């Protein structure tokens, strides 16, 4: 399963037309202890790079943007009571939402893991 | 790193520990080591060690009344028994808070004044101007300060320095020999936990830091955890909750003001008391894990009624907590407030202080 990243440090993994979305390990580390995750509403329709949700840490609050267009079909409700899962497993168990992907061509505007790693050296 | 920032004698230790370091009050200070939440939890459960060398210390030697020191602060220095300390304020003519501070009565004619880092140079000038005698010295550069805070801090200190420490009651201190030098061990702190503030010559701070960390019950904690800890017990932070434009009456801190004595700013406070304050500090709990933050707007009935001055996620309460200022008629427990910042909105309720009551402070 391929993973793609945005410049705003979200990741997306595609499987059978469904995109799992989260924030990168780098972003989770930079935010520090995550204390609150605002999940999108089920059924919400987002455009690529629209706001999907928000994450708060002890240090900062930041918005999360959707890497792809589509409809939210599942949210990670475990994060409501245990947002620290994002710190522990940002690119796996700490996923935020599943988005039914509208246009796979949008993935071309995202970065591969290798490209993202290179990008991190510049920010 | 900014060349203008000052560093404490422990900067090498913080670097070696890979602490996240950031500017605070003109100093480059450790914000976190392992993580703010983990350090907070360690302080509430065990013993946390804080580098507080940035704070300012002044020494006054002479007759308190004749030297004018008695009229400088909002409380009497002359009535502090030797071996005890007292918290209060240095005010401007308008009753605004120039700084909050603690005075330690070292001897009949000797007091140490401990002030915030960012305000220290101005504090020294303001106090010096008001004095009419005595010898007033800024001893900050030569004075190191470590805080050890947490329910196990007494056991740690006794193990390191003997039973003498165990006998110190809350808000008292003792002068004792640590590592071959004279140090002040004070049963005070900023966390709501049992703990000590240790003043020691700065050339011995690194040795004291290393010695205390040899005890496995002790871990270092940064200013990030310190801010969460102090807010959970409702202590004001100078520069955020109180400042030169805020009086102790507005800030709900009149308990540290003795209106029966003379001090600069007293007339303004008496006048404000008569006119009633225009705003009043409140504490509030958010109904979710969202964190209020400095300068978020406080609203009541759809109308802006004030600003948040401090806010944080409280690990002990599992929700957001904060301090702010509102119209006095709204400063009553139970008042519902909405906190707004850009698109974010959260519901909160005015509550009593402290937010967290389970601390080991007086144990």
Image (cartoon, rainbow, N blue to C red):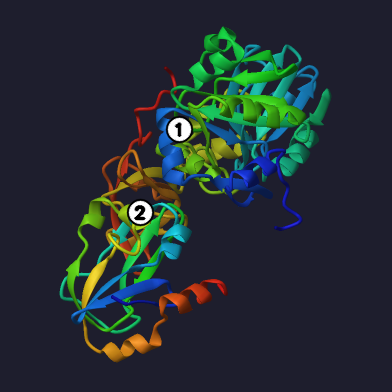
- Vertical order, B109 against B259 (above or below): above
Among the 4 quarters of the image, the one containing residue B40: top left
Q: Is residue B134 above or below residue A76?
A: above
Relative image position of residue A67 (x, y in whole percent) = 33, 79
Please give left or right for residue B205 compared with residue B357 in the image: right
Q: Which residue is mark 1?
A: B43
Label 2 close to label 1 by CB (< 8 Å):
no
- Chain holding disc 2: A
- Please indicate whether residue A37 sits to the left or right of residue B207 in the image: left
Regarding mark 2 in the picture, which secondary structure is present there? helix
Image point (63%, 21%), residue name: B76
Relative to B84, is B199 above or below?
Answer: below
Identified at 59% across, 26% down, the residue is B212
Estimate how packed mark 1 is, as few (under 14), some (14 to 19) or many (20 or more) residues with alpha carbons within 10 Å: many
Q: Quadrant of the N terminus of chain B?
A: bottom right
The residue at which mark 2 appears reads as A88
């Amino acid at each position: 399963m391929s993973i793609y990243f945005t410049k705003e440090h979200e990741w997306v993994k595609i499987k059978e037309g469904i995109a799992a979305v989260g924030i990168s390990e780098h972003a989770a580390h930079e935010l520090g202890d995550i204390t609150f995750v605002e999940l999108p509403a089920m059924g919400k329709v987002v455009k690529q790079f629209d706001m999907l949700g928000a994450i708060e840490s002890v240090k900062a609050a930041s918005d999360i943007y959707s890497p792809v267009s589509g409809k939210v079909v599942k949210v990670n409700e475990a994060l409501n009571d245990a947002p620290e899962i994002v710190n522990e497993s940002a690119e796996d168990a700490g996923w935020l939402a599943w988005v039914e992907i509208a246009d796979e061509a949008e993935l071309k505007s995202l970065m591969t893991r290798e490209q993202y790693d290179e990008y991190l050296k510049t920010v | 790193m900014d060349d203008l920032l000052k560093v404490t004698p422990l900067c090498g230790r913080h670097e070696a520990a890979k602490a996240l370091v950031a500017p605070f009050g003109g100093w480059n200070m450790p914000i976190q080591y392992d993580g703010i939440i983990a350090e907070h939890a360690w302080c509430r459960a065990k013993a946390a060690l804080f580098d507080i060398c940035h704070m300012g210390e002044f020494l006054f030697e002479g007759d308190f009344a004749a030297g004018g020191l008695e009229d400088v602060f909002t409380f009497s220095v002359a009535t502090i028994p030797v071996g005890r300390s007292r918290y209060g304020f240095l005010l401007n003519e308008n009753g605004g808070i120039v700084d909050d501070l603690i005075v330690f009565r070292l001897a009949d004619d000797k007091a140490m004044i401990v002030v915030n880092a960012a305000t220290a140079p101005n504090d020294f000038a303001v106090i010096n101007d008001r004095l009419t005698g005595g010898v007033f010295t800024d001893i900050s550069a030569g004075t190191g300060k470590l805080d050890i805070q947490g329910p196990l801090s007494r056991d740690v200190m006794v193990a390191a320095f003997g039973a003498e420490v165990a006998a110190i009651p809350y808000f008292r201190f003792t002068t004792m020999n640590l590592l071959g030098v004279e140090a002040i061990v004070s049963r005070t702190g900023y966390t709501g936990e049992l703990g000590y503030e240790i003043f020691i010559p700065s050339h011995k701070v690194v040795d004291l830091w290393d010695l205390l960390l040899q005890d496995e019950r002790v871990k270092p904690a940064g200013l990030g955890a310190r801010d969460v800890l102090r807010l959970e017990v409702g202590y004001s932070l100078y520069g955020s909750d109180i400042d030169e434009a805020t009086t102790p009456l507005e800030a709900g801190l009149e308990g540290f003001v003795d209106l029966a004595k003379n001090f600069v700013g007293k007339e303004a406070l008496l006048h404000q008391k008569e006119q009633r304050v225009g705003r009043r500090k409140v504490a509030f709990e958010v109904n979710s894990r969202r964190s209020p933050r400095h300068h978020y707007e406080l609203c009541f009935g759809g109308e802006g009624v004030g600003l948040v001055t401090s806010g944080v996620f409280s690990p002990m309460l599992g929700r957001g907590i904060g301090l702010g200022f509102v119209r006095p008629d709204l400063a009553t427990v139970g008042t519902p407030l909405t906190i707004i910042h850009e698109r974010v909105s959260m519901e909160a309720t005015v509550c009593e202080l402290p937010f967290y009551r389970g601390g080991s402070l007086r144990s």
